Image (cartoon, helix red, strand yellow):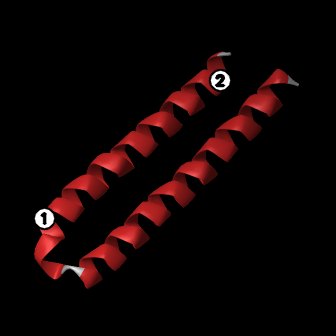
Amino acid sequence: MTGTLAAVGAGLAVIGAGIGIGQIGGKAMEAIARQPEAVGDIRTNMLIAAALVEGAALATIVLAFFA
């Protein structure tokens, strides 16, 4: 039973990370469309935020299988 719950938790973490990174990318594209001259700053901030979301999701997946 514990393995099943871990798999469900890992699946929810992946879905949440996918939604989060999708939102980050979408909002970054909107920001670039509004201010094309700020593309470098927006891209940098987008990549940092996406990496943080991905890191949190990876930590959650690892903890789901070891907890």
Residue tagged by mark 1? 40
Quarter of the image where the C terminus is located = top right
Single out the mark in the foreground, 1 or 2: 1
Q: Is residue 26 left or right of residue 11?
A: left
Residue 6 position in % (x across, y down):
73, 29
Q: Residue at x 11, y 77 (%)?
A: 37
The residue furthest top is 67
Quadrant for residue 61, please give it.
top right
Element marked by disc 2: helix
Q: Is disc 2 surrounded by few (<14), some (14 to 19) or many (20+) residues within 10 Å?
A: some
The residues bearing labels 1 and 2 have C-alpha atoms spaced at a distance of: 38 Å
The label shown at residue 15 is none
Label 1 or label 2, whichever comes before in sequence order: 1
Residue 65 position in % (x across, y down):
65, 23
Q: Is residue 39 left or right of residue 32?
A: left
Q: Amino acid at mark 2?
A: Phe
Q: Residue at x 51, y 56 (%)?
A: 20
Q: Amino acid at mark 1?
A: Gly
Quadrant for residue 63, please give it.
top right
Residue 21 position in % (x across, y down):
45, 57
Q: Residue at x 13, y 64 (%)?
A: 40
Residue tagged by mark 2? 65
Residue 11 position in % (x across, y down):
67, 45
